[in-house]
Image (cartoon, coloured by chain):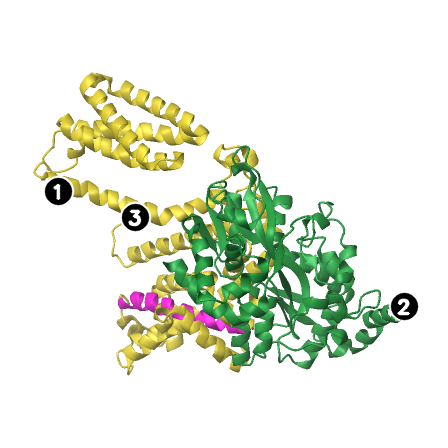
Chain colours: A yellow, B green
Amino acid sequence: MAVETQAVKRPIQFVAPVAGASGAFAGVFVGAANGSVLLGLLLGFGILATIAVVLLEVLDPGLEKTAKWVLFAAMAAAGFLLGGLPGLVVGGLFGWFFGWFIYWLGMGRYRVPLPPYLTAGQVLWHYGFRVICGSIFVFLITPILVVMPLSFNAQDFFTFTPEMLRFDPAGYSLKHYRDFFTSSEWQQALRNSLIIAPLATVLSVSFGTLAAIGLSGEHVPFRRAIMAILISPMIVPLIISAAGMYFFYSRIGLQGTLLGVVLAHAALGIPFVIITVTATLVGFDRSLTRAAANMGADPVTTFFRVQMPLILPGVISGGLFAFITSFDEVVVVIFVGSARQQTLPWQMFTGLREQISPTILAVATILVIISIALLTTVELLRRRSEKMRGLSPG
Amino acid sequence: MKLTKTLLATSALTVAASGAFAESHGNMAMDMTLVSWGGAYQASQQKAYAEPYMAMKDGVSITWDESSSEAVAKLRAMNEAGNITWDLVDVEAADAIRLCDEGLAMEIDHDEVLAASPDGVDASDDFGDMIVSDCFIPQIVFSTTFGYRTDQLAEGVEAPSGACDVFDLETYPGKRALNKQPTANMEWALLCDGVEYGDVYDILETEEGQTRALAKLDTIKDQTIWWSSSAEPIQLLADGEVFMASAYNGRLFSAIVEQDQPIGMAWEWQMFDLDGWIVPEGLPEDRLARVMDFLHFATDTQRLADQAAYISYGPARESSAPLVSTHAELGIEMAPHMPTDPNNATNTFVNNYNWWADYRDDLDAKFQAWLAQ
């Protein structure tokens, strides 16, 4: 078994500056919100370093629980004085975090889950790595999360109003959702999206699956070249495919028609299907098709009864990607479609440019939820297929 | 004499509305794609022209495309691809002039296509100077003017009155937002640097004049946020991110009166501009017939006056002005909110399209280079 690492109290000369630095980091944000970054930075450092000294050196270690609660309450109260109700919440969170952080640091508890032989540098990297990962995660997710409360704004602007920040119910409203469900333009756009995306998905899945199966045979000449051409819509910049499609479709009379948009989106979706299906085909045992043929099944029966059920997870996840591609696509549809084929993303794009209305945020929130649901489905299917192929236990 | 003329005109109108056009209904396309700017402005067009027209002509459907801001580029592409999908496009006067020069917009005989006023004044006289190009069918007069946050005004300080207060960082500290283009900004810079309006364009033609305008803009450059879409300055004001912003007066009106934002208007040295329809060149006959029928209706005296009940833009016809009354939903008097109301500003100017047509490319390059410094 692993060697137990004991928590050893750290010298205050180390703890106080580190706690101070974290305080300075938090102080930058508090200071920015209150007008002076520099003041926030200095005060944050001073306050946290002092608290660390008091908690670890002055107070009896047995008072840890009480000290944490006092810190929590004091920070919450200070936050309330600075920024009202939201300040209370933020302050409380700060108090809770720093109470835990100072003792965790000061008492050397951060060493406990790690092997005792690690150097200080290795320990620093262990936690630094996690902080970096967490920051990247926050960086990616925050813009999406900010959109959601704003979509419940009672005003027609992208603004956190004072009422919203006070958590006053009057500052919140579902009117942008109502607007989305009652406005004929948005409903038309939703209808177009719901017609175009499934049709494009069906085409992408049919052609993509056939192409993937065909290209997985070893006897096909120029396999790599054909594959490269088929997945090129994924690699070529969208604006170039879109401009090309615009002029080509205009000549053959498909520009500005529903069929044109469906075909364009199908072309964009096919690469996703080919890639996912090709990946599932790697694990497909070709001798099964020979066995089926041996027992008198023709190729079509073999495909639907033997091959298809086994590669279905790949087909479905490819289909979902194709669906999302079409459902989220704005560049190609603006070129290939006309005003009659306005899809949701198109409507959002023009809405953002001409009228900054939170209805867009309401729609965005709905779309995010749909996307999460779809991707969860993909993930569940992937796990199921792994289980079926015995790649992962349980 | 006048009575006969009026009678003639009215009867012509009635005939136009009921008989003559109904007969040729068969040769007209049943759907139209109109291109406009979206937002409150497009809504006013929908309510004032499109909905009454569809109620009158059974079975006609109208699709809106909110693409006016890229109208020039898209019309060029459509022309190149030989596939015109738009029937009627709402553009600013400057774009109309450009499209007309390039042969992308159709030249119109205004008296033949458009209705005369109820008093029998020919369309070309009723619109008068507003017809800045043979292809342009004016609808509204709007202005680029200023809005400011009333709640960010220091106590005891007089409210800003217009363009020159943007340059006064001492009295009015805080961020400002200006349009990311030389038009209007260059004029304001010189006007507020003490140049008489009559001399502005002569000075702007010279190298020193341009340097002088940019030097004036330099004084507020680090306090300025540059906007490119017309919804942005309103968002910035509503957010309290800027103290003052140049914006289109109709959007400011909507934010102040309809959305109840703490914003005030500062009209001095507002720049008037025109907006109107153009018909793309190369429409097939049935669609052209439908567009002309719609245009005749949508630009008559009453329709243009009706539009002013939804948005504070002045109707382009002289005969429409007396018919402007109250806001359709709020019931307030619209006249004081019109940019053309003489009580709003003592100094104004009209976008000098012809001058800008000659100098736009050059000054655009200089302005963008200055922005990047």
In the image, which residues are magenta? A259-282
**Structural distance between the alpha carbons of marks 2 and 3:** 77 Å
Q: Quadrant of the C terminus of chain B?
A: bottom left
Front one among A387 and B305:
B305
Q: Pointer 1: what residue?
A: A122
Q: Position of residue B71 (x, y in %)?
A: 55, 69
Kindly indicate whether the residue at mark 2 contacts the one at mark 1 (C-beta within 8 angstroms): no
Q: Which amino acid, by three-letter code, is at mark 1?
A: Gln
| Residue underneath mark 2 | B2
Q: Say which chain tag 1 marks.
A: A
The subunit letter for the residue under badge 2 reads B
**In this view, A97 is above or below A186:** above
SS class, disc 3: helix
Most common SS among magenta residues: helix
Q: Is residue B231 above or below residue B96?
A: above
Q: Identify the residue shown where x is 33% and y is 45%.
A: A138
In the rendered image, which residue does mark 3 sit on? A136
- Going from the N terminus, do you reach mark 3 or mark 1 first? 1
